[in-house]
Image (cartoon, helix red, strand yellow):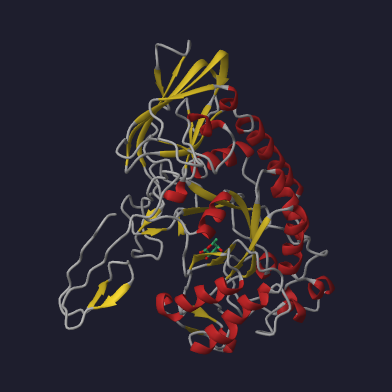
Amino acid sequence: MKKTTLTLFALSLAVAPSGGWAQQAGGSEFVIQQQSLPNPDNEPAPVHPVPHPRQLKWQETEFYAFFHYGMNTYTGKEWGYGDEDEDLFAPTQAPNPKQWLEAVKAAGMKGGIAVVKHHDGFCLWPTATTSHNVENSSNAYAKETNIPRDFAAAAKELGMKYGFYISPWDRNSALYGTDKYVSDVFLRQCAELAQYGTDQFEMWFDGANGGDGYYGGKNTTINVDQSTYYDVPNLRDSVHKVCPDCVLWGVGGEARWIGNEAGWAGETNWSPENRGTAPEGNGMYGSENGWFWLPGESDAKGTNNGWFYHDGETVKSAERLFQMYLETVGRNSTLILNMPPNKAGVLPTATVDVLEDLGNLLETRLGNDLARTAKVEVSETRTAGASRNYEATNLTDGDKDTYWATNDGTTSATITLTWDSPQRIHFVALQEYIKLGQRVKAFKIETSTDGSSNWTERGGSIQQTTVGYKRIIPLNGSTSNYGSAISVKGVRVTIEDSKACPLLHTLSVY
Ligand code: FUL
């Protein structure tokens, strides 16, 4: 039994020998007697901070879409002022969220977030909270429009995750800037959205607050202090009571803004972070010793102009989007890639085609894990417990819940994969068992043509530092040039430094 004793003067509580609390008459000692918890599986102690289970599920979504559609689609703006005539929202046919989701599913995305209210305050569902909504447009398709309803239903049908972007800043609301806005408008809108599903995986609460707006007819500037105005603890609590697995992004943040909107995260990227100047702190890189688990999310435009669709909007190439994937998902970040529906309320054919091409690239380049057929050996294996082992084969069994680990105190180790015949490869991917914290600080990847000698370091000048949820290293050192494969009979990963014993659940080779 371990015993930790803290002495605090002027306190009169003590832990009884039995382990329960006991009052010490007139005493001045505060004793915490910590019993060693039974650990029959010999599981490693966590390295804090660790993710909340909802953050873990969220991270597994990896790659998902953003759909900016709304009043701005018809006015040509990116930030509407909030004074738009509702009639301007005029779809040329019934908007079709199922088509949006089908198209991104073909690109390998596992879900999507639909903007249902942007800063102009125009709501894409019939709501009791404001007249600035679809029902008040004279357009026949608009009157039938209910994006959150149709989006959630389509996602469920397609087996995808869904969430909503609902702008806290509302340039239309006469109540904006008063407490009543938060309780009677914003929180109610969140509650209304829950009628379309309580299994939302993320709520995007954008932090923008440019100040000026129409605000119910008052043409004025209203600035709020977002850290206090939105009553964040209550907001978080209210959302989680209804949608327990929903991660709040931005205001109330449980994930952090990578901060460049260009589709890349730092090669060194920690999920731990301090809540700093912005609520999200050190965007691209996180902080090795951060206090909170605040994993990075990269929001990026999949088209060349706006978040909203504008005339002449063109889609980025599948190769460019593949590069973004490597530089975000491949660097311990999620990627939320924006694909804006057009005035007909659908993704244009050119977008759909690129998404399909992207799906094919991901499938051909990262779809066939050659590690599954390799022999795997490690320099050390943690002593097994009663019902869990930490064997090297856990790395290649395709199961994210089994992992390889070293014994406590061992912070460097090697993993060697070998094949009898030469394999043509481009990428190595690593995944930590982050449930027990992010640990790896430095690693290197080498390959060998015969599997036993002449090991050559790979990855060019790419920093091989953090791993986190997922790290993908292009062996040629380039995220933009797929290049030609290298032929190998061995891959060796050396963990050079780690905060504590390293825990990896998957090692993949493509
Ligand atoms: C920003 C907003 O102001 C943009 O309009 C867009 O919605 C982007 C994703 O977030 O902060």
Corner quadrant of residue 50: bottom left
For the question of whether residue 309 can be seen, the reply is no
For the question of whether residue 425 can be seen, the reply is yes
- In this image, 25 relative to 223: left or right? left
Corner quadrant of residue 200: bottom right
* Along the viewing direction, whichever of 438 and 356 lies nearer the viewer: 438
The residue that appears at 35% across and 40% down in the rendered structure is: 501
The residue that appears at 61% across and 52% down in the rendered structure is: 64
- In this image, 277 relative to 73: left or right? left
Q: Position of residue 119 (x, y in %)?
A: 57, 73
Q: Position of residue 135 (x, y in %)?
A: 77, 79
Corner quadrant of residue 498: top left
The residue that appears at 52% across and 58% down in the rendered structure is: 53
**Quadrant in which the N terminus is drawn:** bottom left
**Quadrant in which the C terminus is drawn:** top right
Q: Height in image: 23 above or below 91?
A: below
Total tally of numbered discs in the picture: 0
Q: Height in image: 431 above or below 246?
A: above
The residue that appears at 54% across and 44% down in the rendered structure is: 401
Q: Position of residue 66 (x, y in %)?
A: 62, 57
Q: Position of residue 162 (x, y in %)?
A: 66, 60
Quadrant position of ligand 1: bottom right
